């Protein structure tokens, strides 16, 4: 024989049941005695189960929440429990306010009569009056074109960093390195890069050093910050080409 089960009557959710229990047992909603409320709540759920009523998951979830608050209150410091209890009190107060507001609205609508006015006709003016600069119109078109934009040639500004970049020759930096060495004979490796204004100049100085080392005209000694660049013996000032 098939077992008959019934939905929980009279309560729209766990907050509805909690508010009913608070009002029935005259509990302080602003300072809820969790142990007493939990006892009454679990007693109600057990009564539902005894008559084969189907207990919804949200009611069981609220029961677990109350058990957790009660367990946290047994700890020496129950700050978390106090915070959760205040949060539950706030939810019940808000739910009660909603119930009261719903009752007042129901009283104003006795008989189901609603009074509304006839819709007014609105004249629509579809003339577009905004003025856009031609650049923004082009940008809007390119954005709407999607993949077709990829087939367009890149704008001139995309090449500005390449075209306007100063070209530094390695030969000029070879002379730059040699002149510094003839003045001081030895110079710290990092000092040669201190006056560089751009990445191109840094690269040109580095390549100049490699060329001079390859030509056996200079040597680099040391490690890290202590590296020194010096002329090799037998080099003269006449070797510098302007």
Image: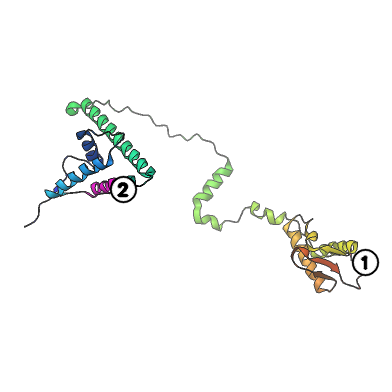
Q: Which residues are magenta?
A: 56-71
Which of discs 1 and 2 lies nearer the camera? The answer is 2
Q: Picture coordinates of residue 223 (x, y %)?
A: 75, 67
Q: Is residue 57 above or below residue 112?
A: below
Residue located 22% across and 27% down the image: 114
The secondary structure making up most of the magenta span is helix
Pick out the residue farthest to the front. 76
Give the image location of residue 94, x and y in percent.
Answer: 31, 34
Quadrant into which the N terminus falls: bottom left
Query: Which quadrant of the view contains residue 202?
Result: bottom right
Instruction: Classify 10 Å Cα crowding around label 2: few (below 14), some (14-19), many (20 and above).
Output: few
Tag 2 or tag 1, which sits nearer the N-term? 2
Of residues 166 and 136, the one drawn nearer to the viewer in this rendering: 166
Give the left or right position of residue 115, taking residue 222 as reference: left
C-alpha span from label 1 to label 2: 90 Å
Looking at the image, the residue that sits furthest to the left is: 1
Image-quadrant location for residue 27: top left
Q: Secondary structure beneath disc 2?
A: helix
Residue 38 magenta: no
**Which residue is more in the foreground, 150 or 84?**
84
Which residue has dot 1 on it?
237
Q: Residues within 10 Å of mark 1 (few under 14, many from 20)?
A: few
- Above or below for 82 versus 197: above
Residue placed most toward the observer, 227 or 175 = 227
* Percent coordinates x, y for residue 173 in the rendering: 82, 62
Residue closer to the observer: 127 or 133: 133
Quarter the C terminus occupies? bottom right
Q: Position of residue 216 (x, y in %)?
A: 84, 74
- Marker disc for residue 71: 2
Where on the picture, by quarter, is residue 195? Answer: bottom right
Residue visible at 31% across and 40% down in the picture: 88
């Amino acid at each position: 024989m098939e077992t008959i089960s019934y939905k929980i009557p009279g309560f729209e959710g766990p907050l509805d049941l909690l508010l009913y229990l608070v009002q029935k047992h005259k509990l302080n909603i602003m300072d809820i005695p969790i142990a007493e409320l939990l006892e009454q709540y679990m007693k109600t759920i057990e009564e539902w189960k005894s008559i084969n009523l189907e207990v919804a998951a949200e009611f069981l979830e609220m029961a677990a929440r109350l058990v957790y608050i009660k367990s946290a209150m047994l700890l020496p410091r129950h700050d978390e429990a106090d915070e959760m209890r205040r949060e539950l009190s706030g939810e019940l107060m808000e739910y009660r306010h909603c119930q009261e507001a719903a009752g007042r609205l129901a009283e104003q609508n006795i008989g189901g009569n609603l009074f509304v006015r006839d819709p007014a006709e609105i004249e629509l003016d579809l003339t577009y009056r905004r003025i856009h600069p031609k650049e923004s119109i082009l940008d809007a078109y390119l954005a709407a074109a999607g993949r077709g934009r990829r087939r367009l040639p890149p704008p001139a500004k995309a090449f500005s960093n390449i075209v306007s970049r100063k070209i530094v020759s390695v030969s000029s930096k070879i002379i730059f390195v040699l002149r510094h060495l003839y003045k001081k004979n030895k110079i710290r490796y990092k000092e040669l890069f201190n006056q560089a204004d751009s990445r191109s100049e840094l690269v040109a100085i580095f390549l100049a050093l490699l060329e001079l080392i390859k030509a056996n005209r200079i040597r680099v000694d040391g490690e890290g910050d202590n590296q020194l660049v010096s002329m090799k013996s037998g080099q003269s000032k006449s070797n510098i080409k302007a």
